[in-house]
Image (tube, grey):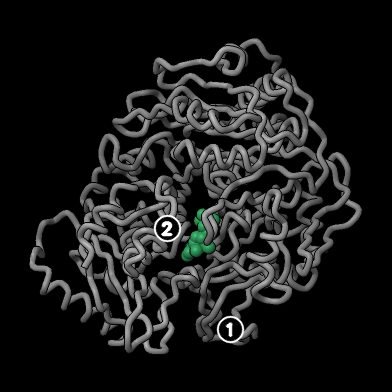
Amino acid sequence: MSNYHIKHLEEYFKVYRKSIREPEVFWEEIAEEHFLWRKKWDKVLDWDFSKPEVKWFQGAKLNVTENCIDRHLSTKADKTAILFEPNNPDEPAEHISYKQLSERVNQFANVLKEHGIKKGDRVCIYVPMIPELAISLLACARIGAIHSVVFAGFSSTALATRINDSDCKMVITADGSFRGKKSIDLKGIVDEALESCPGVENVLVAKRTKADIQMKEGRDKWLQPLLGNASKECNPEIMDAEDPLFILYTSGSTGKPKGMVHTTAGYMVYTAYTFKNAFQYRENDVYWCTADIGWITGHSYIVYGPLANGATTVLFEGVPSYPDFGRFWDIIQKHKINQFYTAPTAIRALAKHGAELLDNYDLTSLKVLGSVGEPINEEAWHWYNDNVGKGKSPIIDSWWQTETGGIMITPIPYVTPTKPTYATLPFIGIQPAIMDENGGELKGNQVEGRLCIKFPWPSIARTIWGNHQRYKETYFSTYKDMYFTGDGALRDEVGYYRITGRVDDVIIVSGHNLGTAPIEDAINEHPAIAESAIVGFPHDIKGSALYGYITLKDSGEYRNHDNLEKEINQLITDRIGPIAKLDKIQFTEGLPKTRSGKIMRRILRKIACNEMDNLGDTSTLLNPEIVQRIIDHKL
Ligand code: 6R9
């Protein structure tokens, strides 16, 4: 019996050791016992990081949707697969059982086929967080079409770039989307994008907001009537293990987004296995990840990982602030959520509104809390632990990337003792390395450097769509025979990992390497401060000096900025040392953020360096208007 479910620390170490010593034997056992294969593999792993080329389960035949849906039907037909919680709390939640999911995916798959979509075709999905979004991914997977989900908050220009980069034949969208009090005209954005996308033949439009929209004759069709007429049976396309399952774009250090390609078998095996263990999912648990399916977190841990385990996964349409800042807690109470997975940016935003709000809700169902997307600062970690988890639900600070497909470094809840701001130990099968700047590996504990991975894991992205050379240069050229993550990390005295932030955020001040994350952590401890972002700017004597952009909490106290500046620098001096003191502090009402909530330090850095005419594309930001305001008030 393979170790599909890790239950205590000793077992973790035992299984981890096996996964490193005999990776092929280990993953073969997992794959063999827990998934449905139409044909088994000829070879478990073939790899060469110098090309780079990675192939898992070569020769195997399968369909991911048979694993995520069909095989559960004999035992779980009536179990809720997707629990849809609408934006408006007065609209009833929708429980979609595995049987209903099967029928709806098959109907959708048949509609795709009727519109000429075949194995290998690319389909762009630009749909808000409604059930049709998850169903459209699965419908593509059913017939072997490659989905490319674009977050339905991106601009028409960003959408068009992504549609054209992978030559999508079809776009699936909705009339509009609800987000809090607002509704957004999605179809209008698609129409604008398609003016520069000649390859798109059809647009399928789901009805959600009932907004009055334009439908282009011959190109655009309402989805629901087509689904209603389609058969509920659809034979799955039998795929090769290494056939692409999807493309997902991620931003790079240059402007052009990278279309990361994930393939079929390895991605399925790894997301399923990590889901089971990183969340300690048990039968009948209700699991909720607040990410949008437009990001990798939603792909792997709302759709594929949970469904491959026959889980109940919540899909929430709305925002944490609507109808008020208690919405997350309301949903946890209402659906008795057992595992809750969110991002530090959301935790900080909620913390800003006080912990008192939580007293009105029963959160006793919670067993596991998760964090992902950026380093979680110490203050947010404690707030989450004390107020949401009441000190009883372990926080899994899970580090991973679009490129890694699944969780890479994380505590296993109730197994790995947690430590604030530490992602702790590598997941089973993951071999991290910390490298110095000259290409040498820093062995042993208490070292800090750049995070690489030495050995392939099943869900590593295989290439960048249409640009294998860029894939090689970005990830496999900095260090020989290693996957370079672009992140900095330290390994402490017991071997726990802490992610210190992107290495492009390391600033060298008077010859000292300073990570932005620890400085921001120190600043954020100040009771008046909501968020901060540190960047470097040129300095005559020090080489680089530190520029801090700081937002204050709502409370209205601390209007005296002079004192506040002194207190901030005192905190930094106390926590890190005088070397990390800020030369300039700019108070601002917001920080430019990506749609997934990451602070865009690149833009802040350029402003600090007076490179205002070279800011790049700011249209894909969550709050593009803040950029001008920061420039206007620059010191
Ligand atoms: C899953 C996801 C990847 C980058 C990654 C790192 C940062 C993600 C983190 C974390 C510290 C964590 N990141 N999780 N940093 N601690 N727990 O977010 O993918 O959007 O591709 O971002 O996010 O810098 O390199 P993606």
- Residue on which the image places disc 1: 436
Q: Where is residue 28 in the image (x, y as percent from the top left)?
A: 81, 57
Answer few, some or many: residues within 10 Å of disc 1's Cα (few below 14, many 20 plus, some between 14 and 19): some
CB of residue at label 2: within 8 Å of ligand 1? no
Taking the image as shown, residue 495 lies to the left or right of residue 572, namely right
- For residue 356, above or below residue 614: above
The amino acid beneath tag 1 is Asp
* Any part of residue 600 in sight: no
Residue drawn at 33 percent across, 24 percent down: 90
Residue 306 in the image: state x and y as whole percent. 60, 43
State the image coordinates of residue 373 (x, y, percent, origin top left): 47, 57
Which is nearer the eye, 346 or 157? Answer: 157
Residue topped by disc 2 = 393
Label 2 crowd (10 A; few <14 / some 14-19 / many >=20): many
Q: Quadrant of residue 162?
A: top right
Mark earlier in primary sequence (1, 2): 2
- Mark toward the viewer: 1 or 2: 1
> Split into 4 quadrants, where in the image is the C terminus?
bottom left
Identify whether 300 is placed above or below 133.
below
**Residue most extreme to the front:** 613
